[in-house]
Image (cartoon, rainbow, N blue to C red):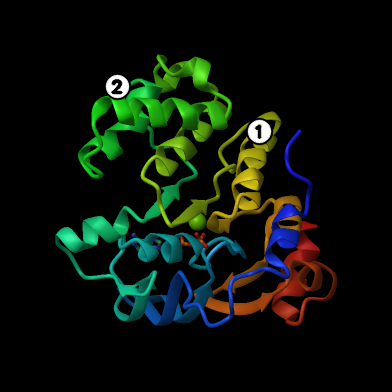
Amino acid sequence: GGPPANAHQAAEAPGAPAGDEPPLVRLSKVNKYFGALHVLRDIDLEVRRGEVVVVIGPSGGGKSTLCRSINRLEPIDSGIIEIDGKRLPEEGRELARLRADVGMVFQSFNLFAHKTILQNVTLGPIKVRKMNKAEAEQQAMALLERVGIAHQAAKYPAQLSGGQQQRAAIARALAMKPKVMLFDEPTSALDPEMVNEVLDVMTELAAEGMTMIVVTHEMGFARRAADKVVFMADGQIVEENTPEEFFTNARTDRARDFLSKIL
Ligand code: ADP
Ligand code: MG
């Protein structure tokens, strides 16, 4: 069986890193427009090393744009984004290197269709991290083992179920040894019976201390794995709270209204 439900919080409690350690991810007064549409409004967010932040909120609120701007898939219009104390540059080699520190898993699995699962997982480490092929394959097999699909390594993405493809996508992101993992609704495109196999992998990652930002509608996962819940609507962070408080005693009307519709 996997780790106990609250292993992560328990591990974080007394021996947690000193509070003076700088946050691993820091957003300060981040603003982003799509034309006249103000999609991110003065976003301030800090994610500490080992912390799991779950981002919840209504569709169109800016959650995906937030994720995409954290690794510069989307440029921002103002504000600061820092990963491990380094400000993300606009472009260039330094950007590619810093971007590789941020692993991303999308709703649609985004695997390369014409490459095997093994090749999907070795490509980045060989090209970007300059790992040799044998080492990359060894690492890939260990990661595929960890997400429970080592026996599918030689197959192509279309030969796998959605849940298996998403676990392959997680292994691919982990192969880059990211400092933080972003998940944007990783289970929303899955058939219901496959949701848990992906959430279980994510819960284990959290318990092992991975720093994670997870956009999800899976409230069970949020309750059990999150250190912090961020409720986002209309481009703003409306409420930041502990999962316990958020689900039982949300501070804002907006969050309570949202919760009343989904729970
Ligand atoms: P969420 O992930 O919370 O559903 P998004 O970040 O996808 O929200 O979208 C926030 C807002 O930005 C929405 O109004 C959406 O229509 C708009 N938007 C997202 N991407 C683009 C884009 N590439 N061009 C124009 N508008 C966009
Ligand atoms: Mg989205």
Tell me, for residue 197, which label it has, or none: 1
Identity, as a three-letter code, of the amino acid under mark 2: His
- Name the one closer to the observer, 111 or 52: 52
Instruction: Report the residue that reaches farthest toward the left.
Output: 92
Dot 1 amino acid type: Glu
Classify residue 200 by image quadrant: top right
Residue 221 position in % (x across, y down): 71, 51
- Numbered disc in front, either 2 or 1: 1
> Can you identify the residue that label 2 sits on?
114
**Which quarter of the figure has residue 194?**
top right
Q: Residue furthest front?
A: 15
Q: Is residue 253 above or below residue 73?
A: below
Quarter containing the N terminus:
top right
The percent position of residue 199, horizontal first and vertical second, equals 65, 42
Q: Is residue 54 left or right of residue 22?
A: right
From what the image shows, is residue 209 above or below residue 259? above
Task: Look at the numbered disc 2 and give the secondary structure of its residue.
Answer: loop
Q: Is residue 17 above or below residue 123?
A: below
At label 2, counting other C-alpha atoms closer than 10 Å, the crowd grade (few under 14, some 14-19, many 20 or more) is few
Ligand 1 sits in which quadrant? bottom left
The image position of residue 219, as x and y in percent, is 73, 55
Whether residue 42 sits left or right of residue 77 in the image: it is right
Query: Which of 140/224 is in front?
Result: 140
Sooner in the amino-acid sequence: mark 2 or mark 1:
2
- Judging from the image, what secondary structure is the residue with disc 1 in? helix
Task: Judge by depth and name the residue closer to the eye, 259 or 35.
Answer: 259
Rendered residue at 39%/37% (across/down) = 110
Q: Which mark is residue 184?
A: none
